[in-house]
Amino acid sequence: MRFALALLLVVCVTGTAMAEDEAPTRAEKGTLGIGLILGEPTGISAKLYLKDDQALQAAVGFAFYGGGLHLHVDYVFHPLILQNKDSFVLPFYFGPGVRVIDYRSGRDTAFVAVGLRVVGGLLFDFKAIPLDAFVEVAGVLEYGFADGEGAGLALNAAAGARYYF
């Protein structure tokens, strides 16, 4: 009976080690991902991993609520990473960033606003293919460069997917 338990333990440990060896590392999957983002903004998204738990992410696109061109860059940390051995890694991320938006539609005058972002999100990083999917929310404290605009608050929420090279 003890021999059978020991044999079962060796098989389980060996199987786990083999499964981990077969999963691609970040370097094998690629550190630069490019894809689409839908929401506020809607456009193109990119993410560059600096370390396994730190990255720069950016997006450029159209802001439906703001009615103009939106550009943001965030420095994100992945402090909590949950793993499914076979399918995906599920990291939570958060971090500071900056946003520039060119407000156009629905306003009397067009103007540019610059702001600081705080973003938080959840990432589904698939192991078998170099693809991730994400959902995120960001609060923005911005300053509008136009008469009567000044400081204000904004909210961004989006989802998207990126392919890694």
Image (spheres, rainbow, N blue to C red):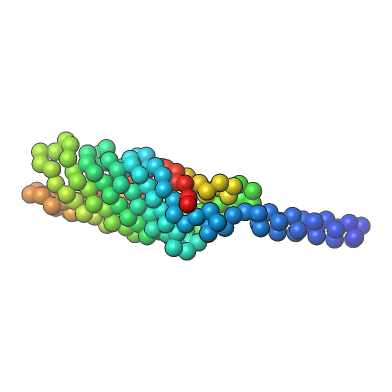
Left or right: residue 129 compared with residue 151:
right
Is residue 53 in sight in this rendering? yes
Left or right: residue 159 compared with residue 132:
left
Q: Residue furthest right?
A: 1
Residue 106, above or below 150:
above
Q: Residue furthest top?
A: 106
- Which quadrant of the structure image shows residue 74? bottom left
Left or right: residue 110 compared with residue 51:
left
Q: Nearer the viewer, residue 128 or 122?
A: 128
Task: Name which residue lies at 90% across and 60% down.
Answer: 3
Q: Residue furthest left?
A: 147
Task: Name which residue lies at 41% across and 44% down.
Answer: 35
Residue 98, percent from left and from top: 28, 56
Q: Nearer the viewer, residue 136 or 163?
A: 163
Residue 33, percent from left and from top: 44, 51
Task: Name which residue lies at 64% across and 48% down.
Answer: 86
Q: Residue furthest front?
A: 165
Total numbered labels: 0
Q: Considering the image in quadrants, where does the N terminus appear?
A: bottom right
Residue 117, percent from left and from top: 30, 55
